Image (spheres, grey):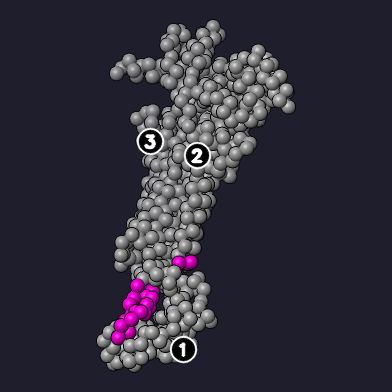
Amino acid sequence: MQDNERKFDLLVRSAMENATEEVPSRVWDSIEGRLPGRRTAPVWRWSAGLVGALAVALGLVLVLRTPSDNPVIQIAPSGEQPAVAEVPATAAVADVDPGVTAAEPAAERAAEAAAKPAGAQAQPQGGARAAAQPEAAQAAEPEAAESAAPAEAAPAAAKPAERKPREEQRAPEAVKPLWESAYADFAEPAKAARRASLDLKGMLGSNDKVSGNFNPFNGYYAAPEKSPTPKQGISEASESIYGIPVTFGLGVRFPLAGRFSIGTGLDYSFLTRTFTGSFVDAAGAVKPGLELVNNLYYIGIPVNLYYNIVDSGRLRLYGFAGGEVEKGVASSFRARNADFVYRESVPGLQWSVDAGLGVQYMILDRVGVFFDPSARYYFDCGQPKSVRTQKPFLFNLEAGFRFDL
Amino acid sequence: MQHLDLELHLNSRNDSEEVRLVRRARKGDRAAQRTIYERLAPKMFPICIRYMGNRAIAEDVLQDGFVTLFSKLDTFSGEGSFEGWARKIFVNTALMSLRKSDVLKESDDIDSAWDVSSDSPTVFENLGYEELMKMIAALPSGFRTVFNLYVIEGYSHKEIGEALGISENTSRSQLQRARIILQHKIKETREKNAGQ
């Protein structure tokens, strides 16, 4: 008997002794990052940082940029009629009088009312507008008022030589910092932000590495729960390997007052884990050593409140917070090494809360792409074992297309 | 300083390539560390898989093991096999990880009704590495650990008991159960293959 055991042991040892396995290249990268002299953050950490930094950088670029929609008044150097032209601010930013840009919206509103009865043929905008709004021009822009005077008195405009050089006409007190005029542009959300929108989205979840082992490519691993072998059902005998949670969904967003909007929708989530376990059937017979894959499916309704931090029309940066209620619709255990499938119902509801920052970029007139990194906490609601019950605090990256309605 | 470097260099000429590599790695030479890694990793990875039961956790243990190895290079005396020394580090790292996750105490709930195989050991001959690795990896953690330590590493039940904090008898019974499960699995697979 012992002799047989010894021979069996020898056979196993000889089969295993000189074994080699191919090691993924990422292992060295991780080791190198942990060796003294150089430190590399794990992929998930630096990529999350990169997304955040990118969002902040884009926001700053837009805040510090002159808005592209604001027309800039350029006065023709010669000609009998005062020629007024509009060019995009970005194209002539070096030559722009910031005072003109800052005062323009007020002048524009007055001009629209005043220019029509005046019958300004040359241009219903620009200089004519400024002329029709003397208080705006005087308060912020004496130069604009002066240059716009020809709209009312053409002969004066016919003498361009008398006009002071542009630089001299500038009133220093009227020059506002670039950021201030840009801020004014963002003070009110763009019209697009006031529209309802439809989201088509997908989401990947991960989790932080607090006490378990986490690999962003393969999943999170946790020890089995200590539970007695059930009279009937699945019993775990090994660690569980948790796959990255995946969610697909449809959502709608409705504008509320000011910069706020509210979003809801329907999500479909898929959670998976693998482990080794056994199954006890109704007759009490045990099937041990099953390599099981447990798939859990949830349908959920999220509700989030959004706040637009930056809205330039094409790019939006926003924060959001809210919650979600989900109902488990199916849970199945399938064995990889045997012909075995076991299904069970999922009782109760899963409640969670989340908060995050999002970036949206309009790729078409009414179609945008968005990235919403967020953190979500899943409450203990007696749900089946999953990455959510093991690591209730998860980081998620939601991305998708947003259609303005 | 130059004189000292030259002296070290001349001394090292008599050393084996492995010792020189270790000496360079000890000083933090990244290229030497990489070479050591490339030589050892394919051999140490199967050890980690055998103990941890799956490749992904084994990758983490492999990482931890190499970080420990490079930080403990000073303690390698140069006598004996470097690979053997490294192997102990990886086994210890795996055991520490298993102990931390508390899985070593969770093997007794597998109630097997199987008996000890009375088959001749020839039934188990020509075991393929991959086939066997899968079966060992699927063993419950406690059985797997004792089986690895006893059968492959060659530790005694007394040493295993001390390392895992269990009695010698527990070690013996876990080893026995591991053998039974493995033998049945091998037979099942053989019969299945023969039937196809």
Front-most of residues B62 and A95: A95
Element under label 2? Answer: strand
Mark 3, secondary structure of its residue: strand
Number of the label disc, if any, that sits on residue B133: none
- Rounded to the nearest angstrom, the CA distance separating label 1 from label 2 is 65 Å
Label 2 neighbourhood size at 10 Å, few (<14), some (14-19), many (20+)?
many
* Residue contact at pointers 3 and 2, CB within 8 angstroms: no
What kind of residue is marked 1?
Gln
- Residue receiving disc 3: A334
The percent coordinates of residue A374 (x first, y second) are 48, 55
Q: Which mark is residue A138?
A: 1
Question: On the image, which quarter does residue A399 sit in?
Answer: bottom left
Count of picture labels: 3
Residue range of the region highlighted in magenta in the rendering? A63-87
Please determine if labels 1 and 3 lie on a single subunit: yes
Pointer 3: residues within 10 angstroms few (<14), some, or many (20+)? some
- Give the CA separation, mark 1 to mark 3: 79 Å
Residue A301 vs residue A75, the one in the foreground: A75
Question: Which of the marked residues, 1 or 2, is nearer the chain's N terminus?
Answer: 1
As shown in the figure, which amino acid type bears the numbered disc 2?
Asn
Looking at the image, which residue sits at the far front?
A161
Say which chain tag 3 marks.
A
Dot 1: chain letter = A
Horizontal and vertical percent for residue A366? 31, 64
Q: Which residue shows up at 59% across the image and 30% down it?
A: B30
In the image, which is nearer the foreground, mark 1 or mark 3? 1
Q: Is residue A138 above or below residue A242?
A: below
Compare marks 1 and 3 and give the one earlier in the sequence.
1
Indicate the quadrant where residue A39 lies. Answer: top right
Question: Which numbered disc, 3 or 2, marks the residue that appears first in the sequence?
Answer: 2
Q: In the drawing, what numbered circle is on residue A215?
A: 2
In magenta segment, residue A65: yes
